[in-house]
Amino acid sequence: MAKIDKSVYIVFGVFGIFLFTINYLFPTQSDDLGTDFGGLSGAINMYMNWNGRFGELLRTAFIGALAPTLFFKITNTIVGIVFILSWFVIIYARLPRNFNDSVILALSILCLLFFSAFGSIFIWAAGCLNYLWAYTLVLLVCIPYRIFWFHYFNHHKIIPQSYSSLMVIGIIGFCIASFCAGMSNEITGIIVVILHICILCYAIFIAKIKLPLWYYAGMLFFFLGFLALYFSPGHAKRAALFIELNIEYYSIGDFLHMSIYEKIARINKVVKSTSTTFIVFVCLLLCFIYERLQQKKWKSTLFIPVLGLVYGVIFLIPTLHFIRHLIGALFFIVTCYYIFWIYRQENNAKLSQLYYYAFLLFIICHICLLLTLQVNIPVRARLFVVLMGIMGFILIYKIMLILLPQAQKKIQGGIFTACVLYAVFVMSAYIDMHIKWNKMAAYIEEQKSKGIKDIVVDSAYFHSYYRRYGDWQNPDKDVTAFPNPSYANYFGVHTFRVK
C-alpha cells in the first residue's frame, strides 16, 4: 500500500475541526426544535403519513431528539468526513494518498461551501439526515461497484469470489445497507437505479461477463428500498397535499398527459443551469480559448461564437423562451464535444480525454436533472448537481495543470488559500449567528421576566450574511404558521413571531 502524504491527514483534520466547530455553534432551528423520541411507533407514523425516507424515520425515532446534544454534533462531524472520503473513492476508486489528492479534497470542500446549501446539508439535523447521511450511505454502497468496474477496465478480469461464512455475513450486511440507501432519498435513488440498469445491460449484452452474487444482491435490495420509499403511504399523502396547496408536483401520469408544448416547457424548466454548471462551462471554455490563442490556432474557435449567436437569438425571441434553458444545455454539451473533437484531430490525447469527460459530465448532469420532472427541488436537494460540478472543477484543475505546468504550485496554493479563506468566512458567519441567537434568547428571557409571553423579535436574528447558511423555514409574521409554534414552545411563551 502506498504511503499516505501527511497533507491528506492535515486536510481531513482541519476539515473535521471546522465541521465540528460550526456544528457546535449552530443553534437548534426550525424542524429540529422540540423533536421528541418517537421510537418505532413514531417512525411508523412518519412512514404512513408524511415521509418514507430512511433518514427521516431515524430522525423521528430518536436522532432528531439528539440534535442539540454533543453526541449528535460529534456523530454528524464524522459522517461529514466519511462523506468527503467516500466521494473521493467514488471518483478515483482508491483512497487519497498524495499532495495532489489533498488539493482535490480542498477543491471539493471549497465547492461544497460555495455552491451547496451547506448549512441545510451539513449542519441542520433535519437536512443532514435526508441529504448528508443519505448521500454518504448511497456513496458507501456504490463503492464496491466502483472498485469492481475499475478492476475490470484496468485488469480486464473479474476478481474471483469465495463465499466463506464471513463473506456471506458481509453480503447480508451489504444488502441491508443497500436497502436503507435505496430508501434514503427519492432523487439519488432513481439516479442510482437507472445507472445500475444501464451498467447491468452493458455487462450482460456488451461485455458479456458473469457478475458475482453480491453484485445482483446489492442491486436488488437497493431497488426494493427505493420502491419502499416511492410507494410509501406518507409519500402519496404528501404528494396529494402538495397538489391541494398548488405546490408544483406532477405524477408520472400527469406528465404523460401533458401536451407536447407543456412537456418541453417542463423539461426546459428542470434543466435550467445552476451557478455550478454555468461556471464550470465558462471555465472550460476560457481554458480552450486560452490554449488556442497560445498555439495561434484561433480559427478553430470560430464555431463557438456561431453556436453562441444561435443561442442568443433564441434567448431574445419571446416566443421561444419555453426552450431557452434546453438550448443552453445543448450548447454546453455540443461545445464540449466540439472541443474534444478538435483536440482529437490534433492527437492531443490528454486534453481530448478531459474534454470528453466534460462532455459526458454535462450529459449525465442534465439526464439526472430530467429525473426531477415531477417536482421543483429546493437548493438543499440539488447536492447531486454540486457533486457533478465538483467533478467539472477537477477537470478544470487538470486542464490548467496541462496548460500552465510552470504555475502548478501557484494553482495548488491558490486552491488551498481560497478554501481556507472561504472556510474562515463561513466560520465567522456561524459565530455571528450564534451571537445573534444568544442575544435573542436573552431578550426573550427579559420579556418573560416582565410577564410578556407574546414575543415579537427582529427578523435579522434569522438572516446570515453567508448565503448558504441554510434554506430551512424560518419564523414569520403569522403566529400560527409553522415553525412559529415550535419556537413558542421551545422558549416557553404563548406566541412567537418576527417583525
Image (cartoon, rainbow, N blue to C red):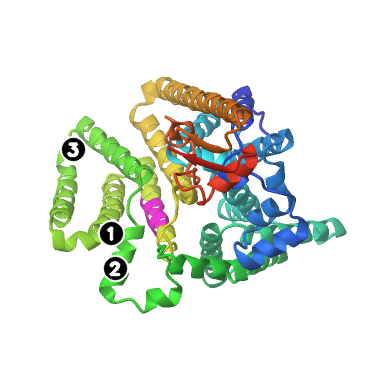
Where does residue 295 sit, x and y in percent of width and height? 22, 33
Q: Residues within 10 Å of mark 3 (few under 14, many from 20)?
A: few
Residue 65 magenta-highlighted:
no
State which mark lies toward you, 2 or 3: 2
Which of the two residues, 201 or 366, is positioned nearer the viewer here?
Answer: 366
Dot placed on the residue nearer the N-terminal end, 3 or 1: 3
Q: Is residue 291 above or below residue 54?
A: above
Which amino acid, by three-letter code, is at mark 1?
Leu
Rendered-image quadrant of the N terminus:
top right
**CB within 8 Å, label 1 to label 2:** yes
Residue 125 visible here:
no
Where does residue 497 sit, x and y in percent of width and height? 49, 41
Query: Where are the magenta residues, as a range?
Result: 359-366
State which mark lies toward you, 3 or 1: 1
Q: Is residue 397 above or below residue 336?
A: above
What residue sits right under mark 3 in the picture?
297
Rendered-image quadrant of the C terminus:
top left
Which of the two residues, 17 or 498, is positioned nearer the viewer here?
Answer: 498
Count of residue discs: 3
Secondary structure of the residue carrying tag 1 is helix
Q: Which mark is residue 326?
A: 1
Q: Which mark is residue 264?
A: 2
User: What residue is shown at x 23% (from left), y 57% (from top)?
Assistant: 324
